[in-house]
Structures are given as C-alpha cells and as structure tokens.
Image (spheres, rainbow, N blue to C red):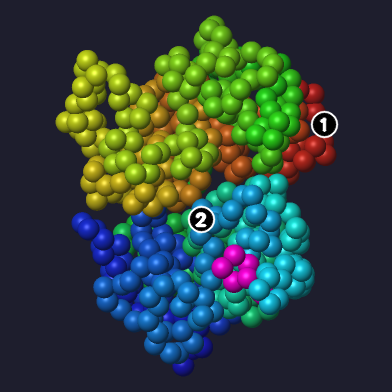
Amino acid sequence: MENYVIEMLRIRKEFPGIVANNNINLQVKQGEIHALLGENGAGKSTLMNVLFGLYQPEQGEIRVKGDTVKITDPNIANELGIGMVHQHFMLVDTFTVTQNIILGSEPKNGLVVDTKRAEQEIVELSEKYGLDVDPKAKIRDISVGMQQRVEILKTLYRGAEILILDEPTAVLTPQEIKELMKILKSLIKEGISIILITHKLKEIMEVCDRCTVIRKGEGIGTVNVKDSNPNELASLMVGREISFKTEKTPAQPKEEILKVEGLEVKDIRNALMVKGLNLSVKAGEIVGIAGIDGNGQTELIEALTGLRKVEKGKINLGGKDITNLSPRKITESGIAHIPQDRHKFGLVLDYAIGENMVLQSYYQKPFSNMGILSFKKIYDYANRLIDEYDVRTPSPYTQAKALSGGNQQKAIIAREVDRSPDLLIAAQPTRGLDVGAIEFIHKKLIEERDKGKAVLLLSFELDEILNVSDRIAVMFDGNIVANVKPEETDEQELGLLMAGSKKQKVGDR
C-alpha cells in the first residue's frame, strides 16, 4: 500500500450547464510536491476547492491519511491539516503581517490579543521554513512575492501539513519564483506535502515529483516527472503538439505611433516612480518592457492609459498629445489596454461575460442607438469572440466571476485585440494562461504587429519578452536603462540589466 496523505476518488462536481470535474482521481504521497496540470477551465481549481471544503462534490470520496472524511467547509480542512493559498491573495492591505496571519485565530492573554506571542511564533516559523518575513511590516508596504510568503505562513500557523498552492508564480518576478522554488523544497524537507496547481512546465520539471493531468474536466493520468518532459506534459494537457517557439518574420517598423518624453509619474503613496522616462514604439513592431516588479512599470502603463496622473512630460499618440486625458478619451484616440490586474481594471465581475466584451464600446453603434442598447447585437458579438478566442464559458450570459482566471483573461484579450487599435498595450497578457492559450495569444500579438499596429508588451516572464518582442526596453529605478534586440541578448544579461548591475548605453541597437 502506498502512503497517501490525500486521496480524492471518483470526484464529480457540477455547476449549472457544466460538469467541472467528472470522475477524477488524485492521490498525493507523503512529502512530495504533486503538480496538478491542465488548461484554463480544465477543473483544477474546482477540484482543489472541493478538497478545501469550498465546494461540495456530487459524488466521490476523500481520504486524508487513510481515513474517509467529509470536508464541508475550510475550517474542517484546516482541522485536517489542509491549507490553501489562493491565486488572488486574501490579505488586508492596512494590517500588519502578524495581524493578517492570526486573523480569526488570535492568541489571547486573558481578554487581550497576545500580539507579542504571535510575532514570536511567526518569527520562529519564518526562520524554520526560510521565509524571511518581517512580522511588523504592513501588507501594502511589501512586495507581491513577500505577500505570498505571508499567505504560506498563514496556513503553516494554522498547522497545515498539506499545502495547496493555486498558480503561485502567476504574479511573481523571475527572482521571486526562484526564491519560492527554494521555499517549496525546504517545506518538503520539513515533512509538508504540497499540491501545486500550475501551467508552467519548467517549474513542474524543476520541483515536482509527480504530475496529475486534467483535460476538460476529465482525469488524463498521473506521470512521474523525472520520466517525462515538457513536450509530453504539454501534449497531455491540451491533446495536441505545442510549439514553444513563436514563429514570426522580422519586424518592419514604420512611422512612430507612441512617443513618451521626460515622463514623471508618482505612485499611490506620492513617491516618484517614473523619472524622466523616454520611450518610442513604431507601427509594425512589438516593444517589450523588461524589469523587476516595482521599478515603475505599473505607473508607466497607468499613465499611458489615463489611470494615473502624469506629473511632468508628454505622451504623444500618432502626433496627438494625449497626456492626462481621461481613460475613455485615450481609448477613443486608438489605444487598447490589457491590464495586469484583470479584476481591478479589466472586468466587472458581476456583469455577464457578454456585457464585459463591450465595456469599451457599448455606447457606440452597433451596440447602442440613441442611447438604447441592442442586447442582440451585444450577445451576437460576444458569441463570435467567445468562439474565436476559445473562452470556456457555459454561455455569454454567465457572470464573469464564475469563469476561471485564465478564461477571464482570454475574454479581456478578445475584447481589446478585436478592436485592432493603433497601439495595443499588453500588460502581463498571458498571466495565468496555459501553454496552448499562450501560444494563441502570442500569435494574436504578432498578427496585430503584422497589420502595421504598434504593440507595447509588459511581462515579467523573460522567455516571453525574448520570444515575442522585436525590441526590448529594460526598466530600472523608473527609467529605461537599455534598449536591446532579443537576438543579441539572453536571460542572464537581461537579469543583470534589470537589477541595475550592468550599464548599457540607452538607444536603439
């Protein structure tokens, strides 16, 4: 008999109009990192939400350490030693690390919360697992990678021995991903078992022992990672061969579409994040922005799209000054924006997915006439985009919040790319997408370029920047510190430039 800490047998979970999990088996061994791999909407997160007690299955059996259990809510999961770190963190920005970790499980000294004792326990846990977290720091003041460590600590503080991580590297920089991989290995050494939901084959090959593949709600099988390879895993996941190299002809840049001069932008705390930046993007080219998160990229994109005030400098689009225009006016000037935070800036989660498809154009013909919306035209259009971009949804009337993160992202990309703007700003366009969807999105970006459109790509994935860009602008400390061609550089050189460890004369190469 294998020593399984988790067994999910013949699990079936249905939602109105869709079978999310159909007769799936998952068996996790003690002390392993077990990958759960599948396309967007394949049912991975649903299966883990069943294990964590957020959903109740229609049929099937769950065993924890050999005992059959009924997990009706997350509190029972916690009591059984199961913790989950969700893709979208559940932290209170204005609270400290300690306040977030102990929330709902506060240690008491009489009637008073014993914060000192909690801080001491958090320091000990942090040191034991190599998490290096400051218990007194406020969440709003720490990086995304550090916030994720807080989420991991939160589960460990509650005694988790089985850790579910849902797309843990989707929001991390390459350096933070390396650190997380080290942390996962140290957790395993301390006896924790980990289920890793991910699309990233490189990470599976690096840290996982076994991998269970789900395709369209069905279990495809479990493989030993050391006996497999990325191509085999990709084929199992999508049911066809995948190309990891984006095919494209050399760019033919034409007239300048975007010109940014001397741009200065502050962040939410009034700190100067973009410092006299100059940038140019031409028709018929993809310019990739590479940089470690927190070096002004977010503020730059928000300034370009009207979401943040420009303090100084000019933004020129096709010869027209669009500095500090409203987001709608900027959109109408010919800019489309795939935002890096899809929930905050990309979707109205309570609206139907069909309504979300026309958020940028609902007030224009053919969707509106004399202020009256034509829902038939709106939903005909939405159905076309859903088919063309393979957005997995029961119907266009389904609320956006009911879709998987990857399918929400595909809906945003469909809406923005289909408008075929003069300048497409794509910020983290493939975050949370599987390899099949990434391949499709990269082709769409290159199609826009080949139509003579300008594309500005912001990504923390260096292989994406190198694969898709025609020119790479490296950002460090609020400025462009280098312009390089992908064929003349590599991840190592880019990493040094991004960290400010290597200087290069700025200018087109």
Determine the image quadrant of residue 452: top left
Q: Give x and y (percent) for residue 58.
A: 26, 73
* 148 drawn magenta: no
In this rendered view, identify the residue nearer to me: 236 or 151.
151
Numbered disc 1: secondary structure: loop
Numbered disc 2: secondary structure: loop
In this rendered view, identify the residue nearer to me: 75 or 483.
75
Q: Is residue 14 visible?
A: yes
The magenta stretch is 102-108
Q: Which residue is drawn at 30% across and 46% down?
A: 399
The residue carrying mark 1 is: 503
Q: Residue at x 49, y 87 (%)?
A: 65
- Residue 277 disc label: none
Asked if 415 appears above or below 24 in the picture, the reply is above
In this rendered view, identify the residue nearer to me: 154 or 100.
100
Task: Estimate the spatial distance between the alpha carbons at disc 2 and disc 1, rounded to whole Å.
Answer: 36 Å
Determine the image quadrant of residue 189: bottom right
Asked if 464 appears above or below 77 in the picture, the reply is above
- Label 2 Cα neighbours within 10 Å, binned few <14 / some 14-19 / many ≥20: some
